[in-house]
Amino acid sequence: MKHLLSLFLIFTAVISAQELNCNVSVNYENLPVANRERLVDFANVVEGYLNTARYTDDDYATKIDCSMSIFFLSAAGDFDYSAQIVVSSTRPIYRSDRNSPMLAINDGQWQFQYQPGQALYSNTTTFDPLTSFLDYYALIIIGMDNDTWEPFGGTAAFQKAQFIANLAATGATNFGWTPSSAVYSRQGLINDIFKEQYSNFRGSIFDYHYGVDIYSQNKELGQQKIVGLIDILWDMYQKKGSINSVYVRTFFDAKNGEIVQYLKFYPDTEIFSKLKKIDPPHTAKYDAAMP
């Protein structure tokens, strides 16, 4: 066991800070033909921007696999667009060729300008509706990933994402950046990540993924680590009667299938009853997993 743990620690040190390997796809079927022609190079430009931008001070060969699927909703004039984006990312499972899902965010509030041939540049002190939006999600991807390799390892990336969110919220072009009561919001996500009430949950992200990593070698220990995160949320639920958190919901939007997979045949069948209360949107999946 000590030898396995040593290998694990070496592995985490190698990939604890990564940049992106992002695949970008675009759907502009809702737009007039003229606008579609102006967006022919958009996917390649955005993909090149994300995969060459530097978001950390470290240089590692292994990058975070992620994707951004952009659905254009409408165009106002020649260069103004509204879009919806689906952001997904994964991280490798130790000693496996499989990946663990990290993000599955659906954000329908994005407005920006783009002209054919436009070069994208990152500016950390000035908000830009196009590049700052991309930077925010790049940093969320990196922060979420780094939290799995080291407790609170994503703090530096999250702080940069929070700076972008705060800068955007006070600007003239703040669509989608202001605090909202909607199920998902960028402000809600980054603010919840830093709230003290979710600190224990965030700290347990590392142990959860250790459970995922160790599961194939030690199923009992792996399940114990995964259940540890659920127990933290269950305690929170019992104290408050509900968990209304964009951060927690974002976690379960990505992880509900994985949790069912790893806790199938778990001795305490009440675990899925707890999950149904902690994570109501995925009740049907937990019902299906109950014996």
Image (tube, grey):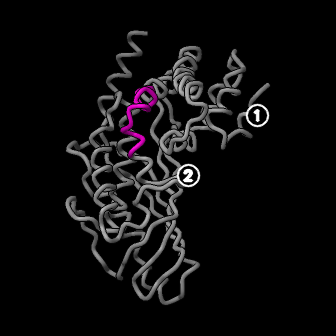
Res 15 → quadrant: top left
Q: Residue at x 45, y 62 (%)?
A: 24
Residue tagged 2: 183
Amino acid on which the number 2 mark rests in the picture = Val
**Residue type at the position of mark 1:** Asp
What residue did someone put label 1 on? Answer: 287
Q: Is residue 265 or residue 240 the one in the foreground?
A: 240
Left or right of 266 on screen, residue 232: left
Task: Check the image and report above or below for 11 versus 167.
Answer: above
**Residue placed farthest to the top in the image?**
2
The percent position of residue 198, horizontal first and vertical second, equals 44, 32
Note whether 76 is above or below 289 in the view shown.
Answer: below
1 vs 2, front mark: 2
Rendered-image quadrant of the C terminus: top right
Number of numbered markers: 2
Q: CA distance from mark 1 to mark 2?
A: 23 Å
Q: Magenta part of the protein: which range?
A: 191-204
Secondary structure of the residue carrying numbered label 2: loop
Badge 2 local density, few (<14 within 10 Å), some, or many (20+)? few
In the figure, 214 relative to 148: above or below?
above
Q: Which mark is residue 101?
A: none
Where is residue 139 shown, x and y percent of the image? 34, 49
Q: Residue at x 44, y 10 (%)?
A: 1
Q: Is residue 192 magenta?
A: yes
Residue 38 locus on image (x, y percent): 42, 84
